[in-house]
Image (spheres, rainbow, N blue to C red):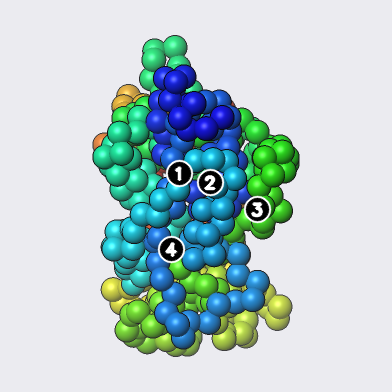
């Protein structure tokens, strides 16, 4: 079916964000097969300097090769393809955010920033200029209506690939304009669709690394863009036990780069030592044992609730405090744009800057950014 034939069906025009990977390619294919008037858009987000080392096993996205892959997919499907230059927006809202968070002693999640500010903000505004009714992405998540007519965000059918965690910031108005065509399928089924459509990227590996750090060395990337200041490493009693080259290179739960032995902390030989806190104001790194990493309470700020309304009081939920974590039972205490989570079981390495996402069964209630542990 050509685009001209699709227009006769009166199905809406939809802009598909195409990264050149299997998931977004199949999203475009499925929508085209259903009869939507599909336009493929690949956003150029960053440009690697000529002297930047690219790791041989780099599996990122958004490179020149990925743009070419997206173009070829669109040609195979029979839909138009355009490249949208979003490098300035990406620099401001993703790369700058990434480095600024590390300066603040926090651990950022660049994919969440990219979703919030680029895919579901910048692209939505551009799609309206193209008179598109919807945008679509290749996220493993689902959108549905509840009994009151409000939009719900649900986990993807393939729980091993579920990406609802990174979509907690969506609003009702955004959800009304978004299609997630692959959320009802498993990864295996998506690859089958790619083979069925004869797409050349059917066996392409999934992106895993940070796309704008093709070398894979985020510490060197931060060093090149900041001016790290050395400071002290202290134990749980506040005693100075070592030094470090900059708080930007450390995150809660980290073991690498400490160069502190258990003997220096009067601990038994073989005891594992971790970063337990990062204080950018005093330029100190706090260290301790695995036990020191455990906590029940989490302070969350910049909270977004999917239905637009915060709960009236404490509610029982499940929550995740990292992308690849598991959901754990907790009580959510809402407080305006902030909230406190109290988990039934202690959680390991509560990391400022990461997201805490709230669930009820397979539905995302909302989420926010971890400000730190609370007692």
Q: Which residue is mark 2?
A: 74
Residue pictured at 65% horizontal, 72% vertical: 57
Rendering coords of residue 4 (x, y %): 45, 30
Quarter of the picture containing the N terminus is: top right
Q: Earlier in the sequence, mark 2 or mark 4?
A: 2
User: Alpha carbon of mark 2 to alpha carbon of mark 1: how far?
Assistant: 6 Å
Q: Secondary structure at mark 4?
A: loop
Report the Cα–Cα distance between label 1 and label 3. Answer: 18 Å
* Residue found 31% across the figure and 30% down from its top: 173
Asked whether residue 298 appears in the rendered view, the answer is no
| Neighbourhood count class around disc 1 (C-alpha, 10 Å): few under 14, some 14–19, many 20 upward | some
Say if 366 sits above or below 64 in the image: above
Quarter of the rendering containing residue 147: top left
Label 4, on which residue?
107
Q: Is residue 267 left or right of residue 181?
A: right
Q: Is residue 311 above or below residue 190?
A: above
Badge 2 vs badge 1, beta-carbon distance below 8 Å: yes
Residue 337 image-quadrant placement: top left
Judged by depth in the image, the label closer to the viewer, 3 or 4, is: 3
Callout 2: 10 Å neighbours few (<14), some, many (20+)? Answer: many
Report how far apart the C-alphas of labels 2 and 4 lie in the structure.
36 Å
Nearer-N-terminus badge (3/4): 4
The residue identified by callout 3 is 201
Q: Which mark is residue 80?
A: 1
Please say if the residues under marks 3 and 4 sit with CB atoms less than 8 Å apart: no
Label 2 sits on a secondary structure element that is helix
Tell me which label, 4 or 1, sits earlier in the chain. 1
* Callout in the foreground (1, 3): 1
Residue 221 picture location, percent across and down? 44, 78
Horizontally, is 94 left or right of 251 in the view? left
């Amino acid at each position: 079916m050509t685009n001209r034939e699709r227009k006769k069906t009166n199905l809406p025009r939809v802009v598909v964000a195409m990264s050149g990977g299997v998931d977004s390619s199949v999203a475009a294919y499925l929508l085209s097969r259903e009869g939507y008037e599909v336009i493929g858009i690949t956003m150029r987000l960053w440009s690697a300097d000529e002297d930047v080392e690219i790791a041989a096993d780099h599996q990122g996205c958004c490179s020149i090769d990925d743009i070419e892959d997206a173009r070829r997919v669109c040609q195979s499907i029979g839909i138009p393809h355009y490249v949208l230059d979003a490098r300035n927006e990406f620099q401001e809202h993703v790369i700058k955010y990434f480095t600024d968070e590390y300066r603040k002693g926090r651990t950022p999640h660049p994919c969440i920033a990219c979703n919030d500010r680029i895919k579901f903000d910048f692209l939505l505004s551009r799609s309206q200029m193209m008179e598109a009714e919807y945008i679509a992405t290749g996220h493993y998540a689902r959108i549905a209506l509840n009994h009151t007519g409000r939009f719900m965000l649900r986990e993807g059918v393939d729980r091993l690939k579920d990406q609802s965690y990174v979509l907690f910031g969506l609003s009702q108005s955004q959800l009304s304009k978004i299609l997630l065509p692959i959320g009802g399928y498993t990864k295996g089924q998506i690859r089958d669709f790619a083979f069925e459509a004869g797409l050349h990227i059917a066996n392409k590996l999934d992106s895993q690394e940070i796309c704008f750090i093709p070398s894979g060395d985020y510490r060197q990337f931060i060093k090149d863009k900041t001016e790290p200041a050395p400071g002290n490493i202290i134990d749980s009693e506040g005693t100075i036990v070592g030094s470090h080259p900059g708080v930007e290179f450390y995150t809660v739960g980290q073991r690498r780069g400490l160069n502190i032995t258990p003997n220096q902390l009067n601990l038994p030989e073989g005891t594992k030592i971790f970063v337990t806190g990062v204080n950018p104001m005093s330029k100190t790194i706090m260290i301790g044992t695995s036990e020191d990493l455990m906590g029940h309470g989490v302070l969350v700020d910049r909270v977004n609730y999917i239905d637009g309304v915060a709960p009236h009081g404490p509610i029982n939920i499940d929550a995740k405090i990292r992308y690849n974590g598991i959901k754990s039972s907790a009580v959510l205490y809402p407080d305006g744009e902030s909230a406190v989570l109290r988990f039934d079981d202690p959680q390991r390495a509560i990391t400022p800057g990461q997201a805490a996402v709230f669930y009820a069964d397979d539905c995302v209630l909302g989420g926010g950014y971890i400000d730190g542990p609370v007692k």
